[in-house]
Structures are given as structure tokens and as C-alpha cells.
Amino acid sequence: MNDLKRVSILGVLFLVILRISIGWQFLYEGLWKYNTLRSNTPWTADGYLKTAQGPFRDTFRAMTGDPDDLGWLNYQAMSDKWDRWAGRFTQHYGLNEQQQGRLRALLDPPAQFERAIGALPAGFDPKALPPVAKIEGSKIIVTGPITPLEMVQLEKSLGVQDQGGKSYAIVNEWGEVQRDTDKNPIPVPKEITDFLANMEAVRKQANTLTFRQKLKGSLAVDPDRVGVVWDPKTRDLQYGPPQGDEGRNDIVRYGEIQEYKDTLAQYDKALKQAKIDFQLDHAERLGKLVAEKRAKLVGPIRAMETELKLEATKLLSGNQIARGAVPPENTPGYRASMQAMWGLLILGPLLILGLGTRLAALAGAVMVLSFYLVMPPWPGVPQAPGPEHSFVVNKNLIEVLALLAIAAFPTGTWFGIDGIFYRLFRRPTVETMKR
């Protein structure tokens, strides 16, 4: 307490207020991040870490596990990710067998589609069905997509033609609508219209792409995205970028994903070489181009995943929805985010209460310093996005210095729980013993 003799009462007051203010800011920020974990859009540090610049750029970006979102452009990686998510979704909400089946149907098509039908049209030959369809008892079974041409051929075998809006008319072999003596179209028998309605319903089911099929279409077989090359070994076209120098280098179409990877490599190289203003400007332009290409390629896949999760949520009952969002996957980015969040939640109350104040302030300074080093405003380092402009010193560094100042003084002893422990366990001085 002799420090009070060297620090004015006003100085003591403002140092304590500063400590409590920083502690409150830590606590509130941590609580806000914690509350988002229960939502469908939990807070993550990925966005901040991925934009890291400066000498520690690679270190901070590596903490996310996928700094350039290349995992979003890999079909197998995304397919495995969705399988893991489906497992967590099933376990978290306790899905019953029916719900599990419907969830699987969102990702993968069933082996066959079935639909009950009534009586078959008189004289109908089952051989007229599309190759992927067959009739078993009172059900029609379809094992794959049905093309529009196959539906037209089926209608023709029944002597009818779709007039638009699934309104059918009886036609002759030349496709002319048959009419009665009053020039009105001859009504189509109900058994035919019912049969075709059932066929159309099961066709829509079989032709609807599941989310994994959509994903494969985007990331595995879309020539614009993945590219096309000629493989002289198989003497066939292959989807994907060139593989090595063993002959598979005849590019038929250069894919957008490979273009993105090439631009990434150019950007990383430009950043490492940037020393003066025009080099920094060139790197900044490449960075914007990388961001544009990433948004164009990754954006649709993110939207697809969002739609998948939305459709899966529709399978839940009210009681299941009340359980909250599915816990995030334990990825490197998630662990980095949790470290930052729990650091704020632990250090904030310690600073407010004045408990272990000096250690808490020192730990807080180290934590905020790591925030500062993600995008330090140093010469030769691209400026952080946003309205603020700083050189060497920014608000994060100021907060680091403030926390070090707090660590240098016994503010917890002046006003806090540390003071209680100090008074209970301090050793008596010579002057106290004399009194």
C-alpha cells in the first residue's frame, strides 16, 4: 500500500477505472461471441485470421486450417464434410428412423422410387415404359432419371398427347387431335390421365438432384469450373486440371478453379516481393482479384450448404428445434475462435473484480498483441480494410500498452479482491509489530 504514497488519488482512480473498463469490454465482447454459438451463424475468427498481413501472415492464416477456402472447391472434402455434419445433426436432434431416411434422401438418391398406381390403362403394354421403370403389383418403380423424350414416347403408346399444363388429348398416329361429331376433343379416359399423373409425379422425384449430386455437378464434372484435359493413356477426355508432366498436359479447357489457384500463387509471390509503393499496389490489385474469384467460386457452394441445412431443419419437430443449433465441427479455425472467446470471457471478469490482476492484465496484453500482429500497421504491410488509418500505433497497440501499465501497478490491491487477500495474508511490517 506504500504505492499510494507515490501515486496521486486521481491517478489511482483512473487506473482502476481503466482496468474495469477494459475488463468490461473483454467480458461483453466474449459474451456476444458466446451467445452467437447458439445461432445458425456462430461467430468465428476465420474471417479475421484469413485477412492477416505482415511477417506473421502465414502463421495466423494457417490457424484456420483452410486459409484460401480451397476445401470448399474440393468435391471429396465437401462430401466428407457434409457426411460429418449429417452425423452431428442426427445425434444432436435425436432423429427417428423416418427423419434419418429423409435426411439421407437430401444428400443421396434412394436406390429406387416407388409410387402406388390404380388400374393400368386398358391394353397397356409395360414394354412401353422407360427403361428405368417397371411395374410390380400395384406400384410403379423407377431406378433412375426419366427423360422428356421417354415421357413423350409413353404418351404416344397410350394414344394421347400433352397439350400443355399436363392436359391430354387423344390423337391419331399423325398427332392430330381426335374430335367427336360436334368438333369437341374426345375426352381422355380417367385411367389414362391418372396413370400419366402418377408417372409424372415419380418422374419428378427421380429427376430431382440431391445436394450431393448438385455438389458433384459443380465441383467434379462442370467443365467451366474444373477444366477438361486430354489423357493420351486412356485416349479420353478427363475432368480436372493437368496432372504432372507425363503426357497429361493437353488442356482442352482451363478450369476456373485452377485459374483461382494460379492467381493465389501470383498474389502470394507479389506480397513477398512487395517493398515499395507500386509493388504494394500491384499486390493489392491481385488481392482484390483473388477475392472476386473466391466469391464467384465459393459463394454458390456456401449457398448450397446453407440450403441443405435449411431443408434439414424443416424435418425437425418443435421440441427438436428448441435444442438449438448443431455444434460446430472441431476444426483448427473453431479451436482458434474458442481460444479467443474464452480468453475474453476469463480475463474480463478477472480485470473487473481485481482478482489476479497483474497476471490477468499481462495475459490480456499478450492476447491483444496477437490481434495487433494479425494486421500490424507497419511500413511495407498493406493497410487493414476499414475507415481507420494507422502507422505503427493503432487502437490494439494502445490497449496493449494500457494493460501493461495496469500490470505495473497493484490496482487490484487498491480496489479489488486482490486487496482482500493482501490484507489477510500480508506479512506484518516492523512498524506494525511495534504498534
Image (cartoon, rainbow, N blue to C red):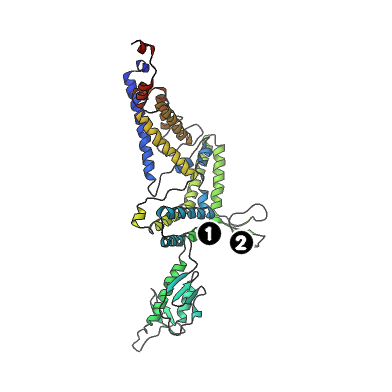
Find residue 190 and report its horizontal and vertical position in percent: 37, 81
Circles 1 and 2: CB distance less than 8 Å? Answer: no
Image location (x, y in percent) of residue 46: 46, 43
Q: Out of 317 and 240, give the one closest to the viewer.
A: 317
Q: Which residue is at 38% across, 83% downward?
A: 189
Categorize mark 2 by other alpha carbons within 10 Å: few (<14), some (14-19), many (20+): some
Name the amino acid type tagged 1.
Answer: Asp
Q: Residue 416, how many percent across, how many down?
A: 34, 26
Residue in the image at 44% along x and 75% along y: 139
Q: Is residue 5 above or below residue 165?
A: above
Local packing at callout 1 (Cα closer than 10 Å; few below 14, some 14-19, many 20+) is some
| Residue to which mark 2 is pinned | 237
Element type at marker 1?
loop
Q: Which residue is mark 1?
A: 222
For label 2, the SS is strand
How far apart marks 1 and 2 lie (CA) works out to 13 Å
The amino acid marked with disc number 2 is: Leu
Q: Quadrant of the C terminus?
A: top left
Please tell me which residue lies in front, 135 or 248.
135
Relative image position of residue 116 (x, y in whole percent): 42, 74
